[in-house]
Amino acid sequence: MGKKRKSSGGGEADDAENNDTKNEPGELHLPNGESSEKKKKKKKRQEEQKGGDSNETPTVSVAVPGSIIHNAQSLELATRLAGQIARAATIFRVDEVIVFDNKSTFVDESSVLMDESNSDEYESGAAFLIRILRYLETPQYLRKSLFPKHNSLRFVGLLPPLDAPHHLRKHEWAPYREGVSLKDQVPDSGGTFVDVGLNKHVVVDQVIEPGRRVTVAMGTNRNLDTGLTYQVVPSSRPRDEAGMYWGYKVRYASNISSVFTCCPHVGGYDYLIGTSEHGAIVRSSELSLPSFRHLLIAFGGLAGLEECIEEDNELKGKNVREVFDLYLNTCPHQGSRTIRTEEAIFISMQYFQEPINRVLQKALP
């Protein structure tokens, strides 16, 4: 988990003194002095330029720093911290969790997650958090096939299950199931056996390398003895066509600027929100978000987003309000001097539920 850093908090700066220029409730400051109307027009132009699929369901992503793991005093406590983040992401239907470092240069994810051994050496905070998040998001019946034994997974059995819609039991039938491709090939066929967590393996209509996680369309026929061939579909299909929450993806970013620039979506994130005790105070019921395809909500670490931006060579010298479209305090008048990041995620995602749902309702056909 890397070197531990002694601190009393997580989500915001430990010196948590009141801002000298506190915003009054309902007051909203936008970056670069732009008016609300100007920003709406700007976002509309960006939407028109992207020209994406209008049937695509809007997504919500959260970005968290891997350094929060360094504040845990033991491997067990670090595991519980990661479990809280996984629970929050699932409860609030987050589509993507980005775990970022504060490195000055770009670092590939493979080099961060290169330790696949079962050694007693602690991983970096980011690698540890990514491993736990991915493990918990994976349906239980696939974990042995997809995750070799690792020291970082020693205490995952203590965590409450996510119980997400795609974490199906053997007796449950659903239009889609997650599966893993097997070594055994179907005789005289171009198909592959896939374990989807049922009493019998199914055959999919393409050749897939062993050990790969896939999403399988199961249809409505529950009889597995009919010899049917099933279809592998994109993992976004249950969300886009059936409106089902289908878990979150996990991505690594070497710094906070990489969170934005390495976005997997065409055109990137079209609305960025930062959270901090130094942000503007707006009641959730009064917060109006513009229509978005891909919303990103960022959380800071032990010293907040301000430090993350200051340590990033690409953003150094920029005011945090220049980086985000909105910079909000989602928990004003806090009683504790600090709010830990795992707590801030629960608080903030509840705060954003009503504004986000208003946007999603407008996006419905």
Image (cartoon, grey):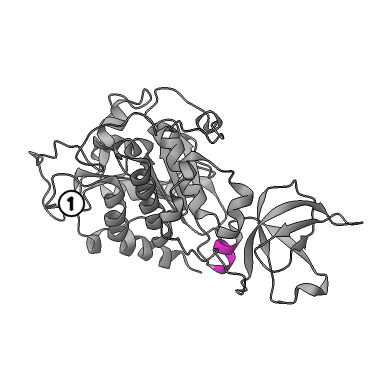
Task: Give SS at disc 1.
Answer: loop
x and y percent of residue 172 in the render?
60, 74
The residue carrying mark 1 is 281
Residue 290 is drawn in which quadrant? bottom left
x and y percent of residue 24 in the render?
10, 51
Magenta stretch: dominant secondary structure: helix
Residue 221 is left or right of residue 303, and the answer is right
The quarter of the picture where the N terminus appears is: top left
* Residue type (three-letter) at the residue carrying disc 1: Ile
Query: In the image shown, does 316 or 144 lie closer to the viewer?
Result: 144
Residue 170 position (above or below residue 38) = below
Can residue 277 be seen here?
Answer: yes
Residue 22 is drawn in which quadrant? top left
Does 130 lie within the magenta span? Answer: no
Query: In the image shown, does 365 or 149 lie closer to the viewer?
Result: 149
Q: Residue at x 36, y 60 (%)?
A: 356
Q: Which residues are magenta?
A: 238-242
x and y percent of residue 85 in the render?
37, 51
